[in-house]
Amino acid sequence: MSNVIISVKDLVKTYGDFKAVKSISFDVNEGEIFGLLGPNGAGKSTTLEIIETLRTKTSGKINVAGYDLDSHPSEIKKIIGVQLQTSGFYPGLNLVELIKMFSGLYNRDVNPIELLTKVNLADKAKSKSKELSGGQKQRFSIATTLINKPKIIFLDEPTTGLDPQARRNLWDLIREIRASGTTVIITTHYMDEAEQLCDRIAIMDQGKIIKLDSPDKMIDELVETGFERPKQVKSANLEDVFIHLTGREIREE
């Protein structure tokens, strides 16, 4: 039996007469990669920001790793990591200096080179964030979520805009983070990414969760209805061809 690390019950968020989140409930299990998917405006970002203690809720109950959101928000902040936007990094500091600054904010003793090695950026230790490629920026952004050694990390569309090699390598990094015992909550607009990475996904639309299950079970249920793709499904796609021809090694400027 999996241990529940995040429990959301009857969560509601309203803005005046507009109800952005409409009494949703779901659990996230410890050690899984959980995807929260949906079109723009579905309410997924609002939901995650409430769990992250970045936005207030209207009603409902949230428990994170045994801590009630209403009574222990500061304790929750200590055990989660939230992916920072690269635009929030001080442009004059190099990666080592940025890690030292963030570790000071978390009151953590962190070895910057060890952390950069974990995300394959040790050779960029003295570079500034503005000098990094897109994939490197995303890997460094994920590195910042690991500074406080969190039990849970939240990744918001981490591979948007990346080329196929950088995207596949980031998938490997996310899997490695999960393998180390960290629970991962991810949002993405790439359905192949959710299918490859997530143990379970919740699909939101218009403020409600309309489906929650594993990707395989969702696909199997759709097939059982008689659904067929208009084009024959092949055992590989064009991205697989690209990776096969060019390799998966990181080749960033």
Image (spheres, grey):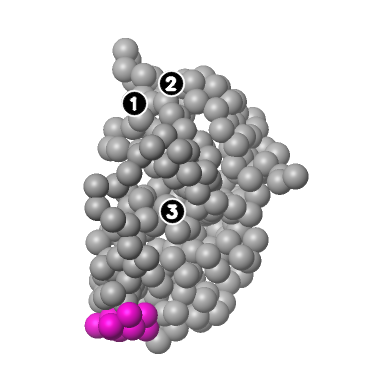
Please report whichever mark, 2 or 1, sits nearer to the chain's N-terminal start. 2
For the residue labelled by badge 2, is the local secondary structure a helix, a strand or a loop?
strand
Magenta stretch: give its range: 244-253
Report the Cα–Cα distance between label 2 and label 3.
26 Å
User: Which kind of residue does numbered mark 3 sit on?
Assistant: Glu
The residue closer to the viewer here, 155 or 169, is 169
Residue picked out by circle 2: 22
Confirm whether the magenta stretch covers residue 21.
no
Q: Which residue is mark 1?
A: 206
* Image location of residue 80, percent across then percent down: 56, 51
- Residue underneath mark 3: 195
> Do the CB atoms of the residues marked 2 and 3 lie less than 8 Å apart?
no
Q: With respect to residue 5, does 106 lie above or below?
A: below
Q: What type is the residue that disc 2 sits on?
A: Lys
Q: Quadrant of the C terminus?
A: bottom left
Q: Position of residue 83 (x, y in %)?
A: 43, 55
Q: Residue at x 26, y 68 (%)?
A: 238
Task: Report the amino acid beneath label 1.
Answer: Gln
Query: Which of the 4 quarters of the picture holds residue 89?
Result: bottom left
